Amino acid sequence: MSATDPLVELVTRAAAAFEHGGFAYAVVGALARNAWARPRATTDADFGIAVAPHQLPALHELIDDLGLRIRKQRPGDGEVPELLLLCGRVDSSLRLDLLVASTPFEDSVLSRRRRVRMAGADVWVASPEDLLVYKLVAGRPRDLVDVEDVATTQKLAGATLDWDYVNYWTEAFGVADRARTLREKITD
């Protein structure tokens, strides 16, 4: 994806707006994957974001200011939805998904996020380990290819992944076998 890609441009604008609005966030999903491995195409962007009930009006205003609308939302346990699926008001192919932090894992993702340069802007991105957990839990074929690419790229770059952290969360989510298979695959 080029720096002039409309989706990446929207992501950098959204990241700046979240920061200005006082929302803790991290890019997750394919764009986070692209921060830690060779880039691949994607048609949407995913954010993990912390939203308190009193911040909902500000979030709705921010969504509107970005030229987006809520196309679907999944209610959470309280006032705050757990998922907001957004698209452009003019170009509905521009899609952002907001995964609202409501679990200890999601809180951990936000506390461990890292600053990464994306299209000329510094944005918060999920750590490689947190991205591995997200994608191992999702478990779709594309996700499993992504985790192998991220783990292999990090290994080749000389980065040390925190496998104890990955193992802890994949065990908690019941997918520790996927983490073991990944680790065996990249250590061969």
Image: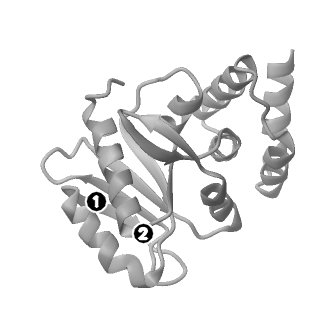
Would you identify the image quadrant in which residue 184 lies?
top right
Sequence-earlier tag: 2 or 1: 2
Relative to 19, is 111 on the left or the right? right
Task: Tell which tag, 2 or 1, sits nearer the viewer.
Answer: 2
Residue 154 versus residue 120 in the image, above or below: above
Q: Position of residue 140 (x, y in %)?
A: 60, 37
Q: Position of residue 24 (x, y in %)?
A: 50, 63
Residue 158 versus residue 10 in the image, above or below: above
Q: Residue 156 carries which label?
A: none
State the residue at coordinates (46%, 52%): 47
Q: Name the residue under label 1.
A: 71
Q: Where is residue 84 in the image (x, y as percent from the top left)?
A: 39, 62
Q: Mark 2 points at which residue?
A: 22
Furthest-left residue in this view: 90
Relative to 130, is 166 on the left or the right? right
Q: Which amino acid does label 2 sit on?
A: Gly
Q: What residue type is labelled 1?
A: Arg
State the residue at coordinates (25%, 35%): 6
Q: Where is residue 76 in the image (x, y as percent from the top left)?
A: 51, 75
Q: Is mark 1 on a helix, strand or loop?
A: strand
Relative to 42, is 160 on the left or the right? right
State the residue at coordinates (40%, 44%): 45
Task: Using the numbered discs, state the Cα–Cα distance from disc 2 to disc 1 in whole angstroms.
Answer: 24 Å
Viewport quadrant of the N terminus? top left
